[in-house]
Amino acid sequence: MTASSTPGVTYAVFRSQEPGFRPTGANEVASGLTSINYSDAEANPSTTYYYAVEAFDNGGTSSASNYATVTTPTAGGVITADLLNINVGGGAADGWVADEDFTGGTATSNGNSIETSLVAKPAPQAVYQTNRYGSFTYTIPGFTAGEEYIVDLHFAETYWTGPGLRQFNVLINGNQVLKNYDIFASAGGEYIATVESFLATADNTGTITIQFVPGSADNPQVNGIEIGVGSIATLARNQ
């Protein structure tokens, strides 16, 4: 967009994962800006966002919104050699071990078919048909201290039928990697698989710790945890 030549004009930025959204106070991420340059430091990786920008004059009257679409880069990479795959909330399935190394949360399952065409390397159907929800932590030992690994978190929303109804946070070894993550919005619907990829360095005991913490709405949920080595995204390494 082009900056206004009118003195005293400020800008507000609105963000959603839904195209054609209406800017409201609920999706406003910045206000009172005097420059048209804005960096969104709280955007999640591997996510498509829709932004709207409105200009406000001294009287508080806004002009028509300008819209933009941005897809953020991955924070992880491509796993080519699996070291551990956990079927969260379920039993062993096609090379994925039964749920282990967790504290807290509640396991549940469903029998619905999960669409996996959007995932380059999907987990077995059984993985997406089970999950753990609530506030919980996976403390996973057995890695080489100080070594870097790729952690893929597999998700499928099997309860809520719209966006914004489940938003939660994820931390890996104490570093926040997802903020108010919305499975439904990221996947594009219910019963659709999606994956978020991250880099993780095993701590001095060779452990990777993954915490699932409530955010803006309802409970955290995850269906599968995949840890391995492979091709690490250059953008992720340079962050």
Image (tube, rainbow, N blue to C red):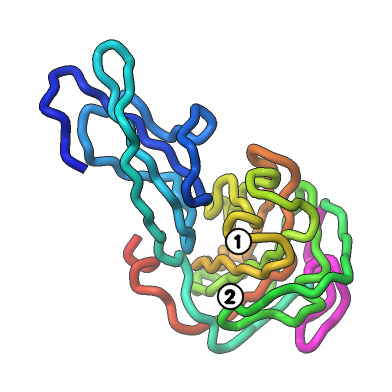
Disc 1 marks a residue whose amino acid type is: Gly
**In the image, is residue 123 above or below residue 213?**
below
Left or right: residue 91 compared with residue 119? right
| Residue at 69% over, 47% down | 166
Q: Residue under label 2, please give it.
A: 118
Name the residue nearer the viewer: 62 or 195. Answer: 62
Q: Position of residue 203 (x, y in %)?
A: 57, 63
Q: Residue under label 1, please give it.
A: 188
Judge whether residue 97 is colored magenta: yes
Q: Position of residue 9 (x, y in %)?
A: 21, 22
Left or right: residue 50 compared with residue 190? left
Disc 2 marks a residue whose amino acid type is: Leu
| Residue at 62% over, 51% down | 182
**In the image, is residue 99 above or below residue 45?**
below
Quarter of the figure with residue 81: bottom right
Q: Secondary structure at mark 2?
A: loop
First in residue order: circle 2 vs circle 1: 2
Q: Is disc 2 in contact with disc 1, using a CB cutoff of under 8 Å?
A: yes
Name the residue nearer the viewer: 126 or 141. Answer: 126
Left or right: residue 1 compared with residue 53? left
